[in-house]
Amino acid sequence: MTMLVFASGSAQAFTLIASGIQGWTASTLTIKWNSSGCGVDATEFESELRVAIDAWNSVPTSRLKLAYGGTTATTLTALRNKTATDAPVIACNTTFLTDHPSDSGVVGLGFAQYLNGTGPVIDFGYIELNAQSGDSGAVSRLVEHQLALLLTHELGHVLGLGHSGDAASVMSYSRRYSGNTLLSRDDMDGISFLYPRVEPGAGIFGCGTLRTRSPSDGELDLAWVFLLELLVLVTLVKASKWGLAYCLEPRASMASRRSESM
């Protein structure tokens, strides 16, 4: 059984990549990649990247959506210097161990950063993949579903999530390959905490309020309104049971710690 090892320390439940960090302001974030030096099949990589993107897009309580933007010529140097104009970008490093001598066996690093240096809103990020020939962590050694899991994990860092202490979480520091990239409840709590979906209002039904016309206009049928409200209430209760309703702020471990260099 293969174990994927990701960079940085562990924590209990989900954490943020840095204390007080706030998510990207964009409603849609376009992800690109530079295939140079990666040593992987381009079609396979694109397919697994789309799987990773779809995983984060599957959270109904997150306002943020990811999109695949194709390939780019943006280099790792431009990303490190924060001069890239199309971040977030995925790039491969063929001298990974020279740049990160203590990270042999690490497959990838995900970064969420501030262009102004102070934050708190993320406005820059990238993923650096290990393409060091002969290293056990080289991305070329992964099979397709492992690659998808890796990309899902590192995208979580780019979005602002740190490591999770939940072993079932995609954001777990060390997770055994399970054959899928399904997000755990902890992953969904974390991304919904950073990117809460904006609801139309708040009231008796929690996520929103039903509006009706005044009885004086003669168009309000109280019996139908009562049945409609009862139906909405039952639907919300069922949604909450299955983890689909996040009317309240998700619980979080605010003892957040930095997962990658800021």
Image (cartoon, rainbow, N blue to C red):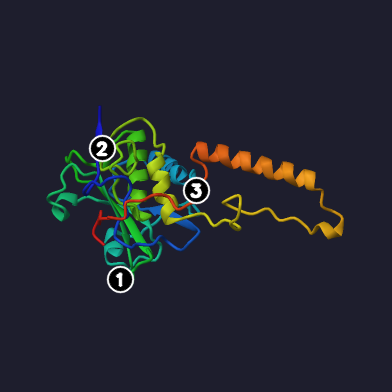
Mark 3 / mark 1, whichever is N-terminal: 1
Badge 3 amino acid: Tyr
Say left or right for 73 vs 102: right
Badge 2 amino acid: Leu
Quote the CA–CA distance across marks 1 and 2. 32 Å
Crowd around label 2: few <14 · some 14–19 · many ≥20 (10 Å): many
In the image, residue 152 lies at what x, y percent? 37, 44
Q: Secondary structure at mark 3?
A: loop
Q: Is residue 22 above or below residue 224?
A: below
The N terminus, quarter of image = top left
Mark 1 / mark 2, whichever is N-terminal: 2
Crowd around label 3: few <14 · some 14–19 · many ≥20 (10 Å): many
Q: Which residue is disc 1 drawn over? A: 118
Q: Secondary structure at mark 2?
A: strand
In the image, residue 192 lies at what x, y percent? 44, 51
Name the residue rendered at 56%, 37% in the picture.
238
Tell whether label 2 touches label 1 (CB within 8 Å): no
Residue farthest along the right direction in this orientation? 218
The circle drawn on residue 128 is: none
In the image, residue 163 lies at what x, y percent? 28, 47
Q: Which residue is disc 2 drawn over? A: 4
In the image, residue 156 lies at what x, y percent? 36, 49
Q: Which residue is disc 3 drawn over? A: 246
Looking at the picture, tell me which residue is in the foreground, 218 or 194. 218
